[in-house]
Every structure is written in structure tokens, then in C-alpha cells.
Amino acid sequence: MEKQKIADFKILKEEKGTRYRFFCQASGMVMVTTKCYPGTNPEQELETAWNNEGRSHFNLCHKCGKWVCDAMYNADVLHCVDCTPWEDKPKYCTQCGTKVDITDVFCRKCGVKLQYREEAVDDN
């Protein structure tokens, strides 16, 4: 995984300085357009805009390193939905077949962790 330091962005030059528009890397949706920054150092200006106004609108996918909005983030596994799509909570344990409650993290009968298929580890 190559972690990107900043989400995709577009530079908007104006008379009074520069504004930045940050985009979700999964949906392409504009998440925030910053105020005008009248700086002289573009790299520092971008970093300030990201830290002050952009970063709070995004989640970092712990698998692929994309910066994505809440709607494109699977918080159960800290991945974007491209890496791990949402799934319905299991209704039955995949190990023993016992009916499980939607709030269960472990099967009440056999103790296996109820989790997304991608996370499952084959012990055989």
C-alpha cells in the first residue's frame, strides 16, 4: 500500500491567492473547497489547506491508501468500499451454522469471530 499524504485536489487560482478543491478518491465527489490562501510557498500552502480544512472530510483506507469520504468508507474494517464492500451482518455462523444476533462479534456456540470474508483466515 502506498499511502498518499493528501487526497486528490485541484488548484483554483484567484486574484487574492489560491483555493484548493479536495476530491474523494473513490467517488470523485468534491468534498471541500477551501478559503483563499495568499501564501508564496505553494507546497506549504497546500499542506496548510489540507490540514486546516480538507483532512477532516476524509478517511484513509488502511488497505490501498486512498483518501475517501464517509459514504465510500467501510468503517467496520477501515477500508474504502472499493477494497472491502459493505456486507450484510451474518445471520448464521459460517463455522457451525448457529443463528447469530446482528450485534454478535463472536458465535455464541463455537466462538469463531464473525467477520467480513476478506478478513477470514483459513487455518487449514
Image (tube, helix red, strand yellow):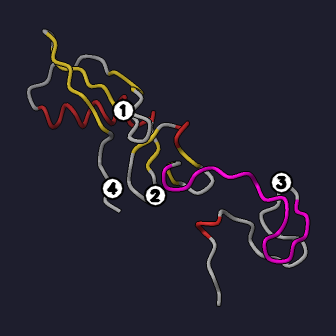
Disc number at residue 3?
4
CA gap, disc 3 and disc 4: 33 Å
Q: Secondary structure at mark 3?
A: loop
In whole angstroms, how far apart are the C-alphas of marks 1 and 2?
A: 18 Å
Q: Amino acid at mark 2?
A: His
Q: Residue under label 3, please give it.
A: 102
Q: CA distance from mark 2 to mark 4?
A: 8 Å
- Which numbered disc, 3 or 2, marks the residue that appears first in the sequence? 2
Q: What whole-number distance in Å separates the C-alpha atoms at marks 3 and 2?
A: 25 Å
User: Is tag 2's residue or tag 4's residue first in the polypeptide sequence?
Assistant: 4
Residue closer to the observer: 40 or 73:
73
**Circle nearer the N terminus (4, 1):** 4
Circle 1: element type: strand
Please report contact status of discs 3 and 2: CB closer than 8 Å, yes or no.
no
Residue pictured at 31% horizontal, 59% vertical = 2
Mark 4: which amino acid?
Lys
Q: Nearer the viewer, mark 4 or mark 1?
A: 1
Find residue 87 and report its horizontal and vertical position in percent: 68, 52
Q: Is residue 35 above or below residue 73?
A: above
**What is the quadrant of residue 40 in the picture?**
top left
